[in-house]
Amino acid sequence: MGFEVEAAHHEVAPGQHEVDFKYANALRAADNIQIFKLIVKTIARQNGYYATFMPKPISGINGNGMHTNMSLFKDGENVFEDKNDGHGLSTIAYEFLGGLLEHATNFTAITNPTVNSYKRLTPGFEAPVYVAWSASNRSPMIRIPASRGKSTRLELRAVDPTANPYLAFSAILASGLDGIEKKVTPKDSVDQNIFLMDAAERAKAGIKDLPETLNQALTYLQTDAIVKDAIGNRVADTFIEAKRLEYDSYRQSISEWEIERYLDLY
């Protein structure tokens, strides 16, 4: 199909698999994602199975993410790399990272666009919940993978597969480039397990929470001119209106959890 899978392996949850594509420019990468999802679902159906990219299809086990790795190249060289830095990152990489952290809560509605997305973004199942970065642990939202040279990159771990990759990559890249333009300095890396920190420790470290619901995420998105402009204001307004309707529909439905919890009790 014209794209290369670099690695594939079984993941933590039953029937869950991780598939890693070889890097490509943003548009080609988005095309690859859409083609891959269509192929997987089609072949599964032909063989009597059902493949889903739903962020949290089953309660109590790890959900499905779409970790997004980013680097910037100029004249064939990765401008994110600096061998003299402790983390191996250049000033441009840090500024791009700062932009991602600054806009993170605002682009979450685009990178995590369904009600179900926020069932995945909860503590205890390896998905990120807090806006932070690290090169040495996997609990923050952004991780710096160990590979260097042309493979020096930032890994945004919050994105999930229900995202429209064309909109998501536009919003993410615009956020990072805004960090470069404004020369944003990111907060210090968080090298301890954030899930073991209490609220006071997180506040002292300047760690913000990702939105807890789609509705909250849409409110943040509404305030961010950089992110909205990245996907086009008309698209952004239509997206927000459609997702508000989706959330209102969700609020009006009654779940099995509510029936089991409250029917007899009250």
Image (cartoon, rainbow, N blue to C red):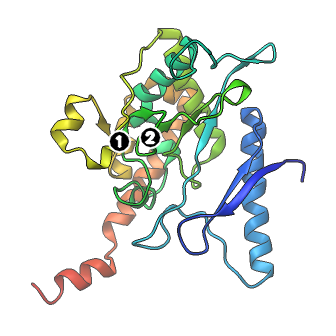
Residue 87 position within the rendered picture, expressed as x and y whole percent measured from the top left:
52, 23
Q: Report if residue 168 is visible in the image.
A: yes
Using the image, tell me which numbered label, if any, was put on residue 130. Answer: 1
Which residue is at 25% across, 78% downward? 258
Q: Residue at x 51, y 43 (%)?
A: 110
Question: Residue 55, image x and y in percent?
Answer: 51, 61
Q: Indicate which disc, 1 or 2, sits on the residue closer to the N terminus.
A: 1
Secondary element type, mark 1: strand
Q: Residues within 10 Å of mark 1 (few under 14, many from 20)?
A: many
Q: For the residues labelled 1 and 2, say whether their Cβ atoms are less than 8 Å apart.
A: yes
Task: State the image coordinates of residue 60 (x, y, percent, origin top left).
Answer: 39, 72
**CA–CA distance between discs 1 and 2?**
6 Å
Name the side, left or right, on which 205 lies relative to 51: left
161 vs 200, left or right, is: right
Q: Which residue is mark 2?
A: 141
- Tag of residue 143: none
* Percent coordinates x, y for residue 24 in the rendering: 77, 36
176 relative to 225 in the view: left or right: right
Q: Is residue 125 left or right of residue 175?
A: left
Residue lying farthest to the right in this orientation: 2
Query: Residue at 45% across / 21% down in the picture?
Result: 98
Near-viewer residue (89 or 33): 89
| Amino acid type shown at disc 1 | Tyr
Q: Quadrant of the C terminus?
A: bottom left
- The total number of labels drawn is 2
Badge 2 marks a residue whose secondary structure is loop
Question: Does 203 sit above or below residue 161?
Answer: above
Quadrant of the drawing holding the N terminus: bottom right
